[in-house]
């Protein structure tokens, strides 16, 4: 199998375990990934030229402005957007991006927002106080029949269909391009939370005239080997020219007097204050590394890791895996050990130098569905412990030896705790 570990900064970093110092085995990549070495090199190199951008007259300011705007073009190309229609806005992260879209909802036709039971809180909470409907699941997949019925029943009155591109709980991949076509057929727009999708699959925004065009896209650098506090929001230029921006301040005003304000054009109008220049450069550099590796290599690599993990988990008594199918899925696996609280399992694995995630992964309604829990279930139970799961999630640098080490440690842990 391919080995991408040489691309990762800090791959050989060791941590204390009950067996002494061992290389840290990070299986919590759905939360944050380590940086690419190329990203760190780029930041170190460009840090020598760091300066304020856009409004400075000095050489360094002009240089960094050029690099910043170049980064915007690289990101646009990475998701195959149409720069004549779509604009790339640099944000803090996916959550920030989604909240910016919430600000502009009054300028979209319709009154109803539709989201799904799969959503991370970042793509659920912004819509809760809007008139909304929630699309459920049919088996372990999105209920497309329910969605079609809801869309047709509310034709012309749906502002937005908000959907995750890939679940951070199970790795499930909703058919976003089919969903886009369904939304557009009734005059709605689609927003894709690509926080988990962008690190694992190529994205094609498509031209605005294409029925499968993705109207809005949001993702974060810290989940794709560029952990410097920057994110991306992509959407139609016209929308971000409507009314006041979601945040006001330096760089957002063209002219101002006691009676009137004229805002600058997008993307600048949505990048108030001094932008995170190095964060934007880091995301662009990460996009270049992805393109250099090639998507098919990354997908094939991840599929091998998934298959080996799911096969190994089946051999360990007392393990329940959620959404077991390996098709239409990114490298995320959530499970529980019978009779053992998820946090205890994670803490036991940490003694082997293995990092996993536990809990509900900011997707409580989806986790509640998978666990078969009713209302009020996320109040503390009799032992004062919240329900949840253990999650392992892969980065491109993980390998079959990592899977084997994880399975061995988990099997030992189950024997001790059960």
Image (cartoon, rainbow, N blue to C red):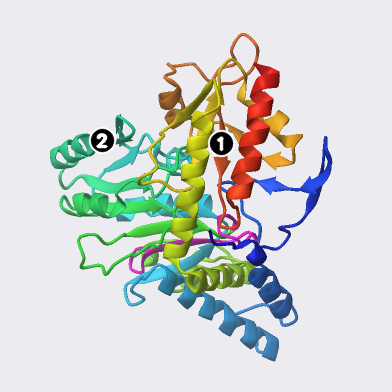
Residue that protrudes farthest toward the right in the picture: 20
Crowding at label 1, few (<14), some or many (≥20) Cα neighbours within 10 Å? many
> Which secondary structure lies at badge 1?
strand
Q: Which mark is residue 346?
A: none
The residue that mark 2 highlights is: 143
Q: Is residue 181 above or below residue 293?
A: above
Residue at point 39% right, 61% down?
243
Res 217 → quadrant: bottom left
**Residue 337 x %, y %:** 57, 22
Residue 20 falls inside the magenta stretch = no
Which quadrant of the structure image shows residue 323? top left
Q: Which quadrant, please, contains the C terminus?
A: top right
Up the image or down, 121 lies above or below 275; here it is: above
Extent of the magenta region: 222-239
Asked if residue 403 lies left or right of residue 291, the reply is right
Work out how far the residue at label 1 is from the one at label 2, CA to CA, in angstroms: 24 Å
């Amino acid at each position: 199998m391919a080995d991408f570990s040489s691309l990762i900064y800090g791959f050989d970093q060791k941590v204390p375990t009950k067996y002494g110092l061992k290389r840290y085995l990070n299986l919590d990549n759905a939360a944050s990934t380590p940086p690419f070495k190329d990203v760190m090199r780029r930041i170190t190199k460009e840090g020598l030229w760091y300066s304020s951008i856009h409004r400075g007259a000095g050489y360094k300011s002009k240089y960094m402005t050029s690099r910043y705007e170049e980064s915007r073009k690289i990101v646009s190309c990475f998701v195959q957007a149409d720069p004549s229609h779509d604009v790339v806005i640099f944000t803090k992260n996916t959550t920030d991006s989604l909240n910016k879209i919430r600000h502009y909802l009054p300028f979209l036709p319709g009154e109803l927002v539709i989201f799904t039971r799969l959503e991370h809180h970042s793509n659920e909470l912004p819509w809760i106080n809007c008139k909304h409907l929630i699309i459920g699941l049919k088996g372990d997949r999105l209920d497309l029949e329910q969605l079609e019925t809801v869309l047709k029943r509310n034709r012309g009155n749906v502002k937005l269909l908000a959907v995750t591109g890939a679940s951070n709980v199970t790795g499930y991949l909703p058919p976003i391009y089919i969903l886009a076509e369904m939304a557009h057929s009734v005059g709605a727009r689609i927003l894709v939370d690509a926080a988990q999708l962008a690190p694992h699959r190529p994205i094609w925004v498509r031209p605005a005239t294409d029925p499968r065009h993705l109207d809005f896209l949001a993702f974060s650098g810290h989940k794709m080997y560029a952990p410097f506090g920057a994110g991306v929001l992509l959407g139609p230029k016209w929308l971000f020219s409507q009314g006041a921006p979601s945040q006001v301040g330096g760089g957002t005003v063209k002219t101002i007097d006691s009676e009137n304000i004229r805002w600058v054009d997008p993307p600048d109008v949505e990048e108030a204050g001094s932008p995170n220049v190095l964060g934007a450069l880091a995301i662009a550099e990460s996009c270049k590394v992805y393109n250099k590796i090639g998507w098919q290599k990354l997908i094939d690599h991840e599929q091998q890791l998934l298959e080996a993990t799911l096969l190994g988990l089946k051999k360990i008594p007392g393990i329940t895996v959620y959404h077991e199918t390996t098709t239409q899925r990114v490298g995320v696996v959530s499970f529980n050990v019978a009779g053992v609280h998820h946090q205890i399992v994670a803490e036991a694995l940490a003694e082997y130098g293995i990092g996993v995630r536990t809990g509900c992964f900011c997707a409580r309604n989806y986790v509640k569905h998978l666990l078969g829990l009713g209302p009020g279930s996320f109040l503390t139970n009799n032992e004062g412990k919240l329900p949840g799961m253990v999650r392992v999630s892969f980065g491109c640098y993980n390998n079959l030896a990592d899977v084997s080490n994880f399975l061995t440690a988990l099997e030992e842990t189950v024997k001790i705790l059960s």
